[in-house]
């Protein structure tokens, strides 16, 4: 079972520095998906269609490790946005928010993550 974003953050920095609380909040805000996926009713799910992966991931925007991570997850389905994002992070560190990144890099990664959630979101059920 995948750890929640909060558990991952706590495992990575159990004792925050003097700026740790601010950094922790920044990371938590970043990990909270802004695309609404109705987790309570499972109305939507994230499904990684291999054909859609090939046609939508632009090599100019995504790094090779990011694209490879998505391709490794091809065919899988996720019922929670955070599970999908955590799986991407497990496959490649390029999907993770690193401590020494600029605001532009944070915005770029967030835009990519939101793109992924929007692109592979499908209606669940019949």
Image: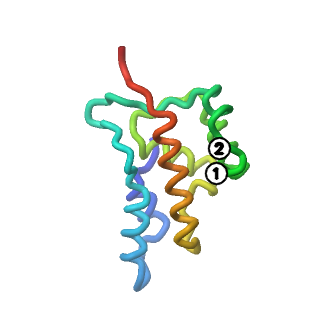
Q: Marks 2/1: CA distance?
A: 6 Å
Give the residue displayed 37% in from the left and 50% down from the top: 34
- Above or below: residue 9 compared with residue 41: below
Residue 109 vs residue 12, the one in the foreground: 109
User: In the rendering, at what x and y percent does residue 110 appear?
Assistant: 50, 56
Rendered image: mark on residue 92: 1
**Mark closer to the chain start, 2 or 1:** 2
Residue furthest to the bottom in view is 18
> What secondary structure is marked by label 1?
loop
Residue 45: numbered disc? none
Q: Position of residue 66 (x, y in %)?
A: 65, 49
Name which quarter of the figure residue 74 lies in: top right
Q: Residue at x 63, y 27 (%)?
A: 50
- Asked if labels 1 and 2 touch by Cβ distance under 8 angstroms, the answer is yes
Residue at point 55%, 57% (across, down): 109
Q: Which mark is residue 69?
A: 2
| Quadrant location of the C terminus in the rendered image | top left
Q: Report helix, strand or loop for mark 2.
A: helix
Q: Is residue 110 above or below residue 13?
A: above
Q: Count residues near mark 2 (Cα–Cα under 10 Å), then give few for <14, some for 14-19, many for 20+.
A: many
């Amino acid at each position: 079972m995948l750890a929640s974003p909060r558990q991952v953050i706590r495992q990575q920095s159990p004792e925050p520095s003097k700026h740790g609380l601010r950094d922790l909040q920044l990371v938590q805000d970043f990990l909270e998906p802004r695309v609404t996926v109705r987790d309570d009713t499972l109305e939507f799910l994230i499904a990684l269609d291999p054909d859609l992966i090939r046609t939508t991931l632009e090599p100019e925007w995504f790094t090779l490790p990011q694209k490879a991570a998505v391709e490794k997850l091809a065919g899988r389905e996720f019922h929670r946005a955070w599970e999908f994002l955590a799986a991407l992070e497990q496959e490649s560190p390029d999907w993770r928010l690193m401590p020494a990144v600029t605001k532009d890099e944070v915005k770029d990664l967030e835009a990519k993550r939101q793109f992924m959630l929007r692109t592979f979101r499908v209606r669940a059920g019949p």
